[in-house]
Amino acid sequence: MNNSFGSPVENKDWIDISVPLYSGMAVWPGDTPFERTNALEIARGNQCNLSQISTTAHVGTHMDAPCHYLEGGAGMETMPITASIGRARVVAIRDPELIRTSELEPLHLAKGERVLFKTRNSEHCWKTDHFQKKYIYIPPETAHYLVRRGVQTVGIDYLSVGGFEHGGAETHRILLEAGIWIIEGLNLQHVEPGDYELVCLPLKITGSDGAPARAVLRKLVL
C-alpha cells in the first residue's frame, strides 16, 4: 500500500483532498487498473525520464460527465468552470450506511450549492488497496432530494456516488439528468465540516465520460 494516503497535503491555507495515483491502488471492479511505467529513463541512457500511464477515466479523485450514464450526454470538455471552482460546503454524514435526506433537511441546501459529503469512507475505505463493496453512498431518494434543492455539484469520499450493489446507476442518472456535476474519490478525512473555497479541475478530455482531477480546499472565514 502507498503511504501517501493519510493527511491531505497542506500548502499554507490550501488542503489537498485528492487521492494519489499509483500502481496497485483500488479501482472499481472491472475497470482498468492504474499503472505507471517508465517508457524512457535517464538511467538507461535516454535523454529524459518519460512516464507512460494506463487506467480508466474514473480512477482515484475524478469527475463524471453526463455521457457516463446518459446516451447522447455531454462529454467532460463541456463542464463549466463554475461547477468545480467556488464556494463549497463540506457536510459531515453520521449515518453509517447511507446519505439520507433526514440528515440533509436541517442544512437547508440552496440552489447552486456545491456540496461535499464527508462520511466514514474517508477514514476507512482509503486505508486499503482492495476495493470496498460496502461504503456510504447516495441512494436514489436522496439524489431526488438534491435535485429538488437545486444543488450544482455533489462530491463524495469514495469511488461512486451510488451504491455498488443497490441503486448506483439510478443515482447517477438522476443527478446527471438534472445537470448536477459529480466529484468522486475525495479524501476528506482531515477536513472539518464547514464552508470552503473549492478548486477541482478534471482533465479536459474531449468526449470522455469522466476524467481524473486534482481537488483542493481553502477554509472560508465568514
Image (cartoon, rainbow, N blue to C red):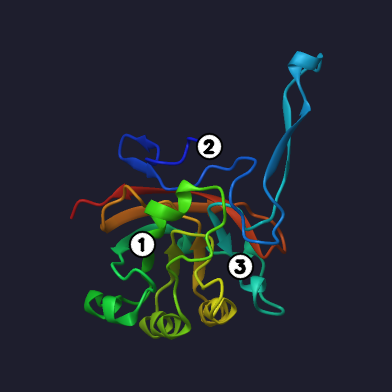
- Among the two numbered marks 3 and 2 on one chain, the one whose residue lies closer to the N terminus: 2
As drawn, the label of residue 2 is 2
Mark 1 sits on what residue?
119
Which residue shows up at 38% across the image and 66% down it? Answer: 114
- Among the two numbered marks 1 and 3 on one chain, the one whose residue lies closer to the N terminus: 3
Which residue shows up at 57% across the image and 64% down it? Answer: 79
Mark 3 sits on what residue?
65
How far is mark 3 from mark 2, CA to CA? 28 Å
Q: Nearer the viewer, residue 180 or 159?
A: 159
Residue 112 placement (x, y as % from top left): 38, 72
Q: Tell me which corner region of the image, top left, top right, bottom left or bottom right, holds residue 115.
A: bottom left
State left or right for residue 71 relative to residue 146: right
Which residue shows up at 51% across the image and 60% down it? Answer: 184
Which residue shows up at 20% across the image and 51% down it? Answer: 221
Q: State the SS at label 1.
A: loop
How far is mark 2 from mark 1, CA to CA? 22 Å
Q: Amino acid at mark 1?
A: Thr
**For mark 2, does the 10 Å Cα neighbourhood hold few (<14), some (14 to 19), or many (20 or more) residues?**
some
Q: State the SS at label 2.
A: loop
Q: Quadrant of the N terminus?
A: top right
